[in-house]
Image (cartoon, rainbow, N blue to C red):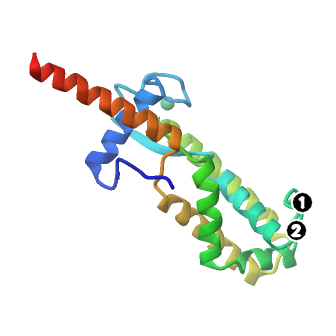
Amino acid sequence: MLINPLRYDTIFEKTELHLLLSEYQDGLCPICNTSLNDATLKELDHNPTVFELKEQVFRAIQIRNGYDPLDMRLTNQKLTKIISTSRRVLEEIIKNILSTQMFIRSLHKKCHSTIDRSLGQQEKDFLKRAKGIISKDIYDRLVEFRKLIKSIIKGHRIISIAQSKAISSRRQEQQLNSSDDFIN
Ligand SMILES: [Zn+2]
């Protein structure tokens, strides 16, 4: 079970999370490798990307339905099965994937928007590929299904176990240091 010690639902806590993640990343943005310290505009980013996570979710659903997970060919029948997955099962699959693999990174806002654009393109390409194969009705449901996966992923604001350990030990150090200051 992963616990987010920072509960970054508020602006202050989000800022704090950026600070701590930036320390964890040695003060660097992993995209452009330059300093994050002076940046006023930052974004939190999922790693793996939401698009990669969607692919993993699809593979997991394929396994559940007895399809070869490595066979990424799209057929009407396969997609109909995939998009009929219940929300409960979908949430379970996503939680399993995220609990073992998800990391959050702090990025410059401009670096994040570059990634966002290329992810948007990957999603468009995927949907375009599907559109040529499946019926209009299934296509519309597929688009909604992909949006649902994304919203469930974004709803899981968790950080990895390694990150939360590193962050809490840093917090303890900081608290120790500040209490030293107080005594001196
Ligand atoms: Zn950057």
Amino acid type for the residue under numbered disc 1: Asp
Query: Residue 108, can we see it?
Result: no
Image vertical order of residue 157 relative to residue 173, above or below: below
Rendered residue at 10%/15% (across/down): 184
Query: Viewed as shown, does residue 4 lie left or right of 66?
Result: left
Give the class, few, some or many, for how many residues have Cα within 10 Å of label 2's Cα (few <14, many ≥20): some
Give the class, few, some or many, for how many residues have Cα within 10 Å of label 1's Cα (few <14, many ≥20): few
Image quadrant assignment for residue 31: top right
Query: Viewed as shown, does residue 117 lie left or right of 85?
Result: left
Question: Considering depth in this image, is 141 or 65 the residue closer to the camera?
Answer: 65
Image quadrant assignment for residue 9: bottom left
Residue receiving disc 2: 67
Amino acid type for the residue under numbered disc 2: Tyr
Rendered residue at 75%/68% (across/down): 61
Q: CA distance from mark 2 to mark 1?
A: 8 Å
Question: Considering depth in this image, is 134 or 44 the residue closer to the camera?
Answer: 44
Image vertical order of residue 113 relative to residue 3, above or below: above
Res. 86 mark: none
Residue receiving disc 1: 71
